[in-house]
Image (cartoon, helix red, strand yellow):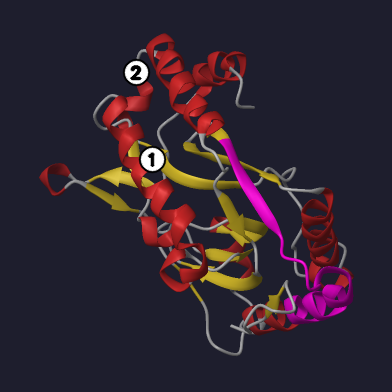
Amino acid sequence: MTLPEAYQSQVQHIQPSPKFQQQGANGVQAMPFPGYTVITPPWCEDPKNDTIYQALERFQQQVIAQLEPGLLIPVPPDSFHMTLADLIWDSAYLHAAENPNFEQELRDRIQVSLQKCQPLVQRETPIYWQVIGLFLRTRALGVCLVPREEDSYDRVIQLRRAIYQNPDLMALGIEQQYNFTAHVTLGYFGEAAATTDRSHLSKALDPLSEYWLGVDPPQELWVHSAELRKFDDMTRYYRESDWAALPLSQNAATP
């Protein structure tokens, strides 16, 4: 996904994201896009990962400077995170939330899933995922992450299985809709994506992605906690103190 050939193919399909809209002279505004997800703590609540998120904030600005003005709408750096399991969002969430018990049932059943997988995923050894290059999606741009070693991969996959194979969650309409591609989103495409020079964009992305191949030692994200979070749009992910959360390393402080 980080090879030049992938960018050449994928840039042909990029589109403006409906998650953000131009608001005249007032700039860009995040549009309502509510739902729930299981993620690592966002940067604003995760000082353990300051080093990598500071590097990604600098890289985000570098990417914006290299691309056509208005092409990439950056997400707030303090919202940087790694998604562990998408749950429900947008129209599916709005429909489900018509049931007044839905949100409490969702929270309870995620708690059961995390408790079930705790013996499989919580160990003394930490989970680390490394930045490997740019990740281009139809409506977004981010960086790809790869596991430092097999154990870091296996424990995240076990966590996802405990969530998506929970029949009580499936009964709420929660199902796995995408293959897992670990990433941190840097921004979403704006209106300029409809008319941008795709060949030029492809050529601009390749050297930006190659930057990460020269970083020594690699930038690593410590995946020390999995947390249920709610979002109203793509700029903030929040939770209450009693919502489901699982420390993934035994030496990690409980959120």
The residue lying at 39 percent from left, 54 percent from top is 54
Label 2 residue SS: loop
Q: Point out the image quarter for the C terminus.
A: bottom right
**Which labelled disc corresponds to residue 196?**
2
Residue that sits furthest to the front in the current view: 216
- Where, by quadrant of the figure, is residue 10 drawn? top right
Where is residue 218 drawn, in percent x and y? Answer: 57, 43
Q: Point out the image quarter for the N terminus.
A: top right
Where is residue 72 drawn, in percent x and y? Answer: 35, 35
Tag in front: 2 or 1: 1
Residue 220 visible in the displayed image: yes
Q: Which residue is mark 1?
A: 59
The residue lying at 78 percent from left, 76 percent from top is 114
Which residues make up the magenta segment? 109-132
Where is residue 239 drawn, in percent x and y? Answer: 52, 79
Residue that sits furthest to the bottom in the current view: 242
Q: Residues within 10 Å of mark 1 (few under 14, many from 20)?
A: some
The residue lying at 71 percent from left, 60 percent from top is 127
- Horizontal placement of 194 versus 126: left or right? left
Residue that sits furthest to the top in the current view: 199
Question: Label 1 is placed on what type of residue?
Answer: Phe
Question: CB atoms at circles 2 and 1 under 8 Å apart?
Answer: no
Magenta-colored stretch includes residue 113: yes
Question: Label 2 is placed on what type of residue?
Answer: Thr
- Distance (Cα) linking label 2 and label 1: 21 Å
Q: Residues within 10 Å of mark 2 (few under 14, many from 20)?
A: some
Where is residue 109 drawn, in percent x and y? Answer: 77, 79
Front residue of 131 and 178: 131
**Mark closest to the chain's N terminus, 2 or 1:** 1
Where 167 falls versus 200 (above or below)? Answer: below
